[in-house]
Image (cartoon, helix red, strand yellow):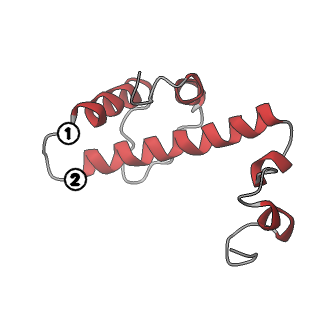
Amino acid sequence: MQAPYSGLSAGLAALSGSPDDALAELATSGQAITVEARVAAIEFVVAAQAIDLRAPGRLGLGTGRAYRMVRELVPFTQADGTLPADLEPLIELVTRGTLTPAA
């Protein structure tokens, strides 16, 4: 995709999918991983919210395990609420790989 349709600036869009990945341009590789982990943490919170809001049902083993791990760190957010300001514990879970299927 090309900017502006991809949501990336022209410089970042040009690097997308290349060995010099777009997030690597943000800072050092360690900080890029932090950005990716933060995005993944937000995705986990949004998925947990969706599970809480849908009709009751059973979750698969892996999904249920991930859901419980997320909810231990980030409680349900009411409809008028926002994402918690401190996602660091969940980001740490993502960074350590605790939420991977092999864990």
Identify residue for label 1: 59
Q: Position of residue 93 (x, y in %)?
A: 52, 24
Q: Nearer the viewer, residue 49 or 4?
A: 4
Question: In the picture, which quadrant includes the C terminus?
Answer: top left
Identify residue for label 2: 54
Counting residues from the start of the chain, the first of labels 2 and 1 encountered is 2
Question: In the picture, which quadrant includes the N terminus?
Answer: bottom right
Q: Position of residue 30 (x, y in %)?
A: 78, 31
Q: CA distance from mark 2 to mark 1?
A: 12 Å
1 left or right of 81 in image = right
91 left or right of 56 in image = right
At x 21%, y 37%, the residue is 60
**Figure label count:** 2
At x 28%, y 46%, the residue is 51
Identity of the residue furthest to the front in this view: 19
Q: Residues within 10 Å of mark 1 (few under 14, many from 20)?
A: few
Question: Is label 1 in a helix, a strand or a loop?
Answer: loop
At x 45%, y 41%, the residue is 44
Q: Amino acid at mark 2?
A: Arg
Q: Amino acid at mark 1?
A: Leu
Quadrant housing residue 64: top left
Q: Nearer the viewer, residue 59 or 14?
A: 14
Q: Position of residue 83 (x, y in %)?
A: 51, 44
Front: mark 2 or 1: 1
